[in-house]
Amino acid sequence: MEDCLFCKIIADEVPSTKVYEDESVYVFEDINPIAPIHYLLIPKQHICCAAKITSENSAVVGHIYEVAAKLAAEMGITDGYRIVTNCGENAGQSVFHLHFHMLAGVKMGWGKEAVQATE
Ligand code: 5GP
Ligand code: ZN
């Protein structure tokens, strides 16, 4: 197995608060939430980041969006949600296993501040 935090979470070697699981996708609560609802949706297959999505492994990405829509409907999230994936250094990716942040439960801003330099 990859020496990867999220692979270890999938394998239950590192504990997590699971929200959903199927044969190809695992969803759990972010340990440091930035919104009232902050889930991480990850493929069970280790893909390091969005830049490594190919025609061979891209089907799971569509499935992840489908799972997000299903979770939102089940949870009664009718006022919207945001899905974000940080890819690489400039975007601030800190765990190198592809993951999609699902944020909800708060009205979110959008604009230049979303891409302001942090240093
Ligand atoms: P990134 O910064 O790579 O886009 O997102 C990584 C996310 O993983 C962060 O939001 C961070 O809070 C979350 N995270 C890091 N370590 C853990 C952990 O051990 N458990 C959980 N549930 N989330 C984690
Ligand atoms: Zn991994």
Image (cartoon, helix red, strand yellow):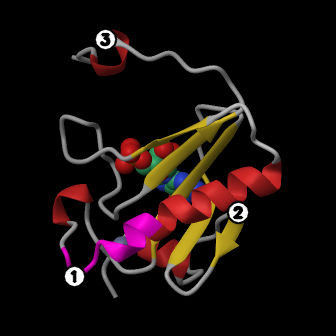
- The Cα atoms of the two marked residues, 1 and 3, are separated by 34 Å
Q: Which residue is mark 1?
A: 56
Q: Is residue 108 above or below residue 104?
A: above
Residue 71 coordinates in the image, percent (x, y): 70, 58
Badge 3 amino acid: Lys
Disc 2 or 1, which lies upstream in sequence? Answer: 2
Residue 106 in sight in this render: yes
Whether the magenta-drawn stretch holds residue 102 is answered as: no
Residue visible at 59% across and 57% down? Answer: 68
What label does residue 112 carry, if any? 3
- Secondary structure at badge 2 equals loop
Check disc 2 and report the residue beneath it. 17
Q: x%, y% of residue 48? A: 26, 65
**In the displayed structure, does residue 44 sit left or right of residue 86?**
right
Residue 1 picture quarter: bottom left
Task: Please name the residue shown 49% across and 47% down the image.
Answer: 101
Residue at position x 70%, y 50% in the image? 72
Q: Nearer the viewer, mark 1 or mark 3?
A: 1
Name the quadrant containing residue 89. top left
Q: Is mark 2 within 8 Å of ligand 1?
A: yes
Q: Is mark 3 within 8 Å of ligand 1?
A: no
Q: Position of residue 113 (x, y in %)?
A: 35, 12
What amino acid type is highlighted by mark number 2?
Thr
Q: Is residue 32 left or right of residue 1?
A: right
Q: Secondary structure at mark 3?
A: helix
Residue lying at 45% horizontally and 79% vertically, measured from the top left: 44
Crowd tier of the residue under label 3, counting other residues whose Cα lies within 10 Å: few below 14, some 14–19, many 20 or above: few
Residue 77, percent from left and from top: 75, 41
The segment highlighted magenta reads 55-62
In front of the other: label 2 or label 1? 1
